[in-house]
Image (spheres, rainbow, N blue to C red):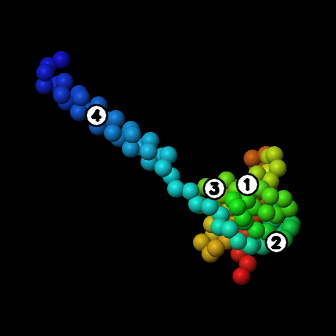
Amino acid sequence: MSMRARPMTVRIAAVAAAVSAATLVGATGRAVAEVEPGTYTSTTWSSGIVLLQRDARVEGGELVLIGRYPIHPTPDGGYVDLFPGHRVVMTSDGRGGYEGPAFFGGVVIGSITLTPKP
């Protein structure tokens, strides 16, 4: 390898390392949003039919519904595992509430909405 090629190889390696580091930091530095604390009306839907509607609240990073369930933050809300295999996703609706699919065993079985109470 010539003396001129060696500095170019070092520069290329340095640029590649910088780009890789920026990509890694960018991927791990993703912002997360939390489901806002407050009181809500929780509505569970399946096939367009209301299955259950009840008072709910979010406090201390938990959804308080029938029990207390830790909320796992995501970039646009969060999700809760109600019991093994049953997960509900709460995505901000842009109006202070949340909505998203309900899964059982990885299959969508319905949806949930959290509507803020005044």
Q: Nearer the viewer, residue 23 or 39?
A: 39
Q: Give the residue displayed 72% in from the left and 64% down from the top.
A: 59
Q: Earlier in the sequence, mark 4 or mark 2?
A: 4
> Which amino acid type is marked by label 1?
Pro
Cβ–Cβ below 8 Å for labels 2 and 1? no
Across and down, in percent, residue 19 comes to 35, 41
Q: Give the residue number, with chain letter if any, for mark 3.
A: 73
| Label 1: few (<14), some (14–19) or many (≥20) C-alpha neighbours in 10 Å | some
Mark 2 or mark 1, earlier in chain: 2
User: Is 100 located above or below residue 26 in the figure?
Assistant: below
- Residue at left offset 14%, top offset 19%: 2
Q: Secondary structure at mark 1?
A: strand
Within-10-Å neighbours for mark 4: few <14, some 14–19, many 20+: few
CA–CA distance in space, label 3 to label 4: 36 Å
Q: Which residue is mark 1?
A: 70
Disc 4 vs disc 1: Cβ atoms closer than 8 Å? no
Q: Quadrant of the N terminus?
A: top left
Spatial separation of the CA atoms under disc 4 and disc 2: 57 Å
